[in-house]
Image: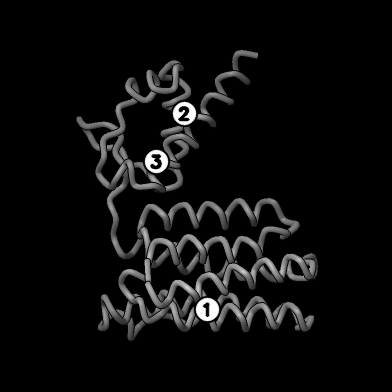
C-alpha cells in the first residue's frame, strides 16, 4: 500500500512541476530544490525525486554536477526534433480519430478555428497558440490508441516548454495555418482516405517548422527533410 501511495504522490508532484514548466513559472535553467517542492506539496522528498526522474527522461529536466536538478535549457535542435516528432504522431492520431468524430465535434473544431481567424486582426501569439492546441486536440482526442495520445500530449507539453509560441517568430504563418485547418476539416467531413488526412495533418505541422527555420536559420532550412 505504501508503494501505491508513493506512486500517486509521485504523479501529483510530476504534474505539479510539469504544469509550472509549461506555464513558464519554472523557466529554463530554474533550479528545482527537491526539499522546497516537497514542502509545498506536503510530502516527502522520495516521490518528488521520482517525479524529477520522470521529467528528466522526457528531457524537461537536467542534472548538473554540484548543482542538482534544473529545468532544461532551450535550443533549436530540441524544438526541431519535437516538431518533427509531433508532425508524425499528431498526423497519425488525427487520422485514427477521423472516423470517430461526430458532426458536433467538427462544428466545435470549426468554431475554434473561427476564433483563431478573429484574433488575426489583433494578433496575440500566445492566445493563438492556445487556441491552436485546442483545435488540434478536438481532432485527435478520439484516437482509440491511448499510447498514441500519450505521446502526442507529451510532445505538446515539451513544445510549451521550448517555445511559448512559434507564431511570435513567424506571425505570417498564422494566416496560412487557419486555412490549412479548414482543409483538414473538409477532408474529414468528406470521408477522405485516412492516408490523405494523415498526410495533410503532417504537412500542416511541418509547414510551421519550415517557416520558423527559414526565418531563424535560413541556411539550415535549405537542408530540412520533407515529411
In this rendering, the answer to whether 3 lies above or below 196 is above
Q: Which mark is residue 170?
A: none
x then y, percent, for residue 144 = 75, 57
x then y, percent, for residue 179 = 54, 83
Helix, strand, or loop for circle 2?
Answer: helix
Between marks 3 and 2 in the image, the one whose residue lies nearer the viewer: 3
Instruction: Find the distance from the CA under tag 3 to the CA under tag 1.
Output: 29 Å
Q: Quadrant of residue 76?
A: bottom left
Q: Which mark is residue 50?
A: 2
Report whether 30 appears left or right of 99.
left
Q: Crowding near pointer 1: few (<14 within 10 Å), some, many (20+)?
A: many
Report whether 19 appears left or right of 90.
left
Counting residues from the start of the chain, the first of labels 3 and 1 encountered is 3
Q: Nearer the viewer, residue 114 or 211?
A: 114
Between marks 2 and 1 in the image, the one whose residue lies nearer the viewer: 1
Q: Nearer the viewer, residue 105 or 7?
A: 105
Q: Which mark is residue 20?
A: 3
Q: Which mark is residue 178?
A: 1
Between marks 3 and 1 in the image, the one whose residue lies nearer the viewer: 1
Amino acid at each position: 500500500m505504501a508503494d501505491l501511495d508513493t506512486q500517486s504522490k509521485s504523479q501529483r508532484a510530476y504534474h505539479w512541476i510539469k504544469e509550472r514548466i509549461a506555464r513558464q513559472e519554472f523557466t529554463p535553467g530554474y533550479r528545482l530544490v527537491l526539499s522546497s517542492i516537497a514542502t509545498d506539496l506536503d510530502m516527502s522528498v522520495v516521490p518528488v525525486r521520482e517525479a524529477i526522474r520522470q521529467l528528466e527522461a522526457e528531457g524537461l529536466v537536467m542534472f548538473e554536477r554540484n548543482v542538482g536538478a534544473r529545468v532544461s535549457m532551450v535550443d533549436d535542435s530540441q524544438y526541431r526534433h519535437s516538431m518533427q516528432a509531433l508532425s508524425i504522431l499528431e498526423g497519425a492520431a488525427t487520422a485514427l480519430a477521423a472516423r470517430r468524430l461526430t458532426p458536433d465535434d467538427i462544428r466545435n473544431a470549426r468554431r475554434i478555428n473561427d476564433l483563431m481567424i478573429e484574433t488575426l486582426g489583433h494578433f496575440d501569439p500566445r492566445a493563438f497558440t492556445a487556441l491552436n492546441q485546442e483545435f488540434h486536440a478536438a481532432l485527435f482526442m478520439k484516437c482509440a490508441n491511448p499510447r498514441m495520445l500519450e505521446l502526442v500530449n507529451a510532445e505538446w507539453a515539451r513544445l510549451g516548454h521550448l517555445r511559448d509560441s512559434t507564431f511570435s517568430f513567424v506571425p505570417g504563418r498564422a494566416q496560412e495555418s487557419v486555412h490549412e485547418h479548414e482543409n483538414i476539416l473538409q477532408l474529414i467531413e468528406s470521408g477522405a482516405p485516412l492516408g490523405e488526412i494523415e498526410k495533410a495533418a503532417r504537412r500542416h505541422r511541418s509547414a510551421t517548422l519550415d517557416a520558423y527555420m527559414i526565418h531563424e536559420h535560413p541556411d539550415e532550412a535549405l537542408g530540412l527533410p520533407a515529411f
